[in-house]
Amino acid sequence: MNRLAKTLLFALAISLLVHLLLFFFPDVPSEFTLKEEPLRMELVPPPKPVKFKPIAPPGPKRAPAPSRTEKTASPLAASEPAPEPMSRSSPAPVAASEPQAAPSRVPLHAKLTFRVFRGQDIMVGTAVHTWDIQDDGHYEITNQVEATGIFSLFVKGAIEQVSEGQVTGEGLRPDRYTVTRGGPENRQTARFDWKEGKLTLDSGSSEKTVALEPGTQDQLSFLYQFAYTPPKEGVFTFIATDARKIDTYEYRILGEETLRTGTQKYRTLHLAKLHDTGVEGTEIWLDMDHYYWPVQVMMSDSKGNVLRQMIDKIEIR
């Protein structure tokens, strides 16, 4: 490979890494961002999050609809779908309450594997979500993102998110959230003190404490909070932290859509973040037949570049 080809490949890999960082951790600054940070909406004063009515535990005759994904370690094969219109995404609300055992309708252990694409057909990485709930209601959700193929030669290390907390009568109540980019020397942590109503944001070199509003989520827990409080019609707001800051977000529910991934077909609820024209945006598709788990997330920047996180398989253990 000549020097010019190596230089071009390296430049492409760096560009894709930047987009991966923006996709999973939109607060990371770069030349690709606009005047405001991606996925950042600050309202003064921030509106209080809408509290959705918790789903009552199903009765004996209302077990979850049968599905191939509910079989132990049953992979859902997926191929790349055509991209759909975009807009922008983030967390859902829950109010603090006393911990209790996880609702029986939600699996206790699962693994969701996603493929990450740039544009329509360039696969640049994978994202693996793990979901674990203990008998006492303690939960842990992880997300590990890694570059694949030729891009792994230039992009070393993984990006990891970990959300830990309790399952309450109203869903997930995070106690601790960490983001690690490449290694422990680059780690941010958010600690939730629900009793005192304080949120501590720790960058590793400095700390700051802000008010903790009821229902606040982190950037990972919000995706799985929908399993307990599915969004209703219209527009809703919520508060979330990325371990660096805390923001208020506003989303619109666009309605039900059928999402096809190769031989699989999903009945989804399509959510879009409200944003101005020409500003980066994100959309989320939730699987309505399987606990409202995310099966596709798409993000676009101001230049029209698109990153798409598409479900590859779901394993329920």
Image: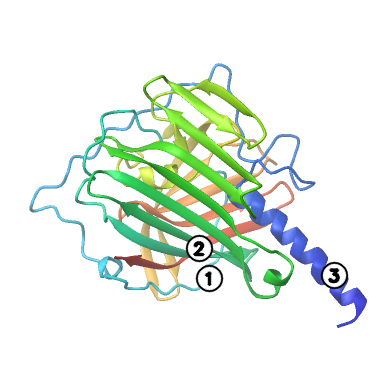
Distance (Cα) linking label 1 and label 3: 26 Å
Please give the label number shown on residue 310. Answer: 2
Q: Nearer the viewer, mark 2 or mark 3?
A: 3
Instruction: From the image, tell me which residue sits under label 1.
Output: 80
At 53% across and 40% down in the image, what residue appears?
273
| Horizontal and vertical percent position of residue 162 | 48, 48
Question: Which element type, helix, strand or loop, lies under badge 2?
Answer: strand
| Horizontal and vertical percent position of residue 164 | 41, 43
Where is residue 165, by image quadrant? top left
Please state which amino acid type lies under the numbered disc 1. Answer: Glu
Earlier residue among tags 1 and 3: 3
At 65% across and 63% down in the image, what residue appears?
118
Q: Is residue 7 left or right of residue 300?
A: right
| Horizontal and vertical percent position of residue 240 | 49, 34
Q: Nearer the viewer, mark 1 or mark 3?
A: 3
Please give the label number shown on residue 8. Answer: 3
Q: Residues within 10 Å of mark 3 (few under 14, many from 20)?
A: few
Cβ–Cβ below 8 Å for labels 2 and 3? no
Distance (Cα) linking label 2 and label 3: 27 Å
Question: Which element type, helix, strand or loop, lies under badge 3?
Answer: helix
Question: Which of 157 and 97 lies nearest the eye of the viewer?
Answer: 157
Q: Is residue 203 above or below residue 48?
A: below
Cβ–Cβ below 8 Å for labels 1 and 2? yes
Which image quarter is the N terminus in?
bottom right
Determine if residue 238 is in view: no
Question: Which element type, helix, strand or loop, lies under badge 1?
Answer: loop
Please give the label number shown on residue 138. Answer: none
